[in-house]
Image (spheres, rainbow, N blue to C red):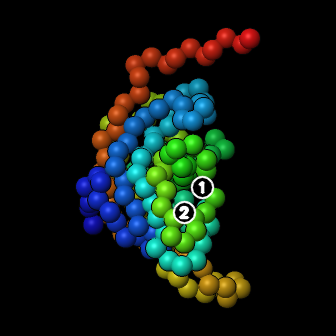
Amino acid sequence: MRVAAGTEVEAAPFRVRLDEASARLELHGDAAEEGQALVVVAGWIELTVPESVSATVLTQAFTADLSSAYDQFGSPVEVPEPSVRVSADGVSLRGLGPGLRYDVQVTFVVDEEAVPERLSVTLLEHRLRPSALDGDLGWFDAQPVALVALDVTPLPTTRPEPEALR
């Protein structure tokens, strides 16, 4: 299902709204590596179930149609997996507790030359079921539930010079 930016989407165990996307060279003081850029999607997310979920379930709720993407450690990846940060202070969400809603920045790392003009973010929902390994109940089997298309505000035309060391 295709949805417009700013549309609330149920993607179990979350409710999500993605509002806008921009390309940046830094976010909350963390700079992109030389030759790379950050594609940042702003919105909010809330947990709709009565138990907490891990950062793994949270980051697996998003993917994007990006080429030349990297993981948070700088290694190339075929399937982009973002970091999810609280918008106000840039703290990485390590999970989400019941009844909480956060304004977030879902961030993907790409080659600077590969920053798109338009980005399609797929929202994935999970299914609550017992683990095949240990029988513990968890959120598994991520499946696409919605596609959000966003225009991406481009990078500045010139990269700022690093500040001189003092």
- Whole-Å distance between the Cαs marked 2 and 1? 8 Å
Secondary structure beneath dot 2 equals helix
Badge 2 is on which residue?
58
Task: Give residue 90's quadrant in the image.
Answer: top right
Q: Residue at x 48, y 51 (%)?
A: 104
Amino acid type, mark 2: Leu
**Screen quadrant of the N terminus:** bottom left
Q: Are marks 2 and 1 in contact (CB under 8 Å)?
A: yes
Residue furthest right in the image: 166
- Label 2 Cα crowd, 10 Å radius (few <14 / some 14-19 / many 20+): many
Measuring from the top left, give residue 29's x and y in whole percent. 60, 32
Relative side of 86 to 136, left or right? left
- Label 1 Cα crowd, 10 Å radius (few <14 / some 14-19 / many 20+): some
Badge 1 is on which residue?
93
Measuring from the top left, give residue 6's x and y in whole percent. 30, 54
Q: Residue at x 49, y 56 (%)?
A: 102
Vertical arrangement, residue 146 with respect to residue 118, above or below: below
Q: Residue at x 40, y 51 (%)?
A: 43
**Screen quadrant of the C terminus:** top right
Amino acid type, mark 1: Leu
Secondary structure beneath dot 1 equals loop
Q: Which comes before the other along the chain, label 2 or label 1?
A: 2
Q: Give the number of the mark in front: 2 or 1.
A: 1
Measuring from the top left, give residue 156's x and y in whole percent. 41, 23
Vertical arrangement, residue 44 with respect to residue 166, above or below: below
Q: Which mark is residue 12?
A: none
